[in-house]
Amino acid sequence: MPVTSDLLAASPALRFDVQAQNGEARAGALTTRRGVIETPVFMPVGTAGTVKAIRFEELESEDLDAKIILGNTYHLWLRPGIETIKACGGLHRFIGWDRALLTDSGGFQVWSLGDLRKITEEGTEFRSHVDGSMQFLSPEVSMEVQAALGSDIVMVFDECAPGNAAYEETEKSVGLTSRWARRSRMAFDRMQVDGADIGHIEGPGLNGRQALFGIIQGAGHLDLRRVSLEQTVEVGFDGYAIGGLSVGEEKSVMFDVISDLAPRMPADKPRYLMGVGTPEDLIEAVANGVDMFDCVLPTRNGRTGQAFTSRGKVNIKNARWVRDQRPLDEDCRCVVCRRHTRAYLRHLYLAGEMLASILLTHHNLAFFLDTMRSVRQSIRSGDFPKFRREFTQRLDANGE
Ligand SMILES: [Zn+2]
């Protein structure tokens, strides 16, 4: 029996309109209580209330123009703690960001603690990486924390099976994820009614409440993925995510899951691929009908001296750039590429200057966001297959 409460059915927490389609690829608009987001969209990851090495002004600048970023329930809950964020008026006010925020549920983070956590029917017990204390996260706690953060899109608390998990183990994990999805939905609805959502804001045609996304699990087993999809849709959510990919499985397994699953997901709701991936992964997933992405790659790799460019990856440490007067990417119009050479960026990196991380992160985010802009345009003009072919060919140039 669906557990979606009628209070959310009257007027929705968000709207999603598919405006153009090229094969399975779709371009659309996701209207949240904090603005309209054109899809397909890439969401920069702001784990601890900051997208690492980049200022919010830059995220809002024309270069990047990120319409939505991620926050991380697990990290913010442990530090600075939910009472602190509540006292500071919720996550938007605390970090100084008025645009949309999506928070993950913490499920993936506690799962990735490995031996440091214990999963039961009730939830997950684990040791905090901050102070070593024992902590307990469950669907109810996760919904409570995300309501206090006041994010615009909330994720259900799920259980992730490893990418290469055996059938029986995965089957159990899918069952647990489904029961947790139901508990998440019920706790979420209760908290919306109780006014626990710190970020509540009225918007035209929207009910001002948080939106809740379900997560489909099932590792590399396509039949279990379909079971998980069916059970998740039965509960009823504002959007649906594919979880548990890019967790150690082969790339071919990942794409088998995406190509089988994404087109079966509800067509009138946003489809979100969690934690994936490289620019070429994003394009392939878009071709299968995915609308939303997040990944730490552009920011994390930026801090380790790796740039994503239209001609493939550039490792800025490489001696061949020592006097190279070219920008990171000759086709990129970001402020870093307009102003600085590879030679200078290499020098900054080798000298251990923090500006190296800042500039590489900026360019990488610009490249990811710009790629999605081109993807949207090409879908709207009916040229996505051509764009996909040319984009992929250019990447093979290996930075040259
Ligand atoms: Zn650039």
Image: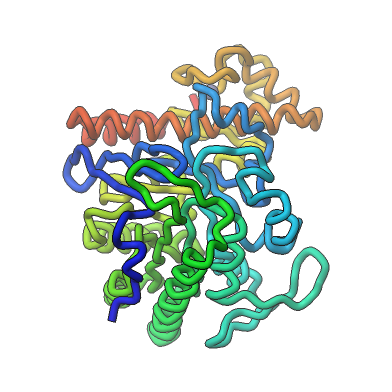
Residue 38, relative to residue 238: is it above or below?
above
Residue 262 location, quadrant: bottom left
Residue at position x 17%, y 31% from top? 382
Residue 211 lies, in percent from the top left, at 42, 57
Residue 207 lies, in percent from the top left, at 39, 52
For the question of whether residue 369 can be seen, the reply is yes
Residue 150, relative to residue 177: is it above or below?
above
Residue at position x 48%, y 64% from top? 192
Residue 287 lies, in percent from the top left, at 26, 45
- Towards the viewer: 133 or 335: 133
Count of numbered marks? 0
Residue 118, relative to residue 208: is it above or below?
below
Residue 26 lies, in percent from the top left, at 24, 43
Residue at position x 70%, y 54% from top? 85
For the question of whether residue 161 can be seen, the reply is no
In this image, 136 relative to 387: left or right? Answer: right
Residue 124 location, quadrant: bottom right
In this image, 195 relative to 357: left or right? Answer: left
Q: According to the image, what is the colour scheme of the structure? A: rainbow
Residue at position x 61%, y 12% from top? 339
Quadrant of the image for the N terminus?
Answer: bottom left
Residue 223, relative to residue 172: is it above or below?
above
- Towards the viewer: 101 or 74: 101
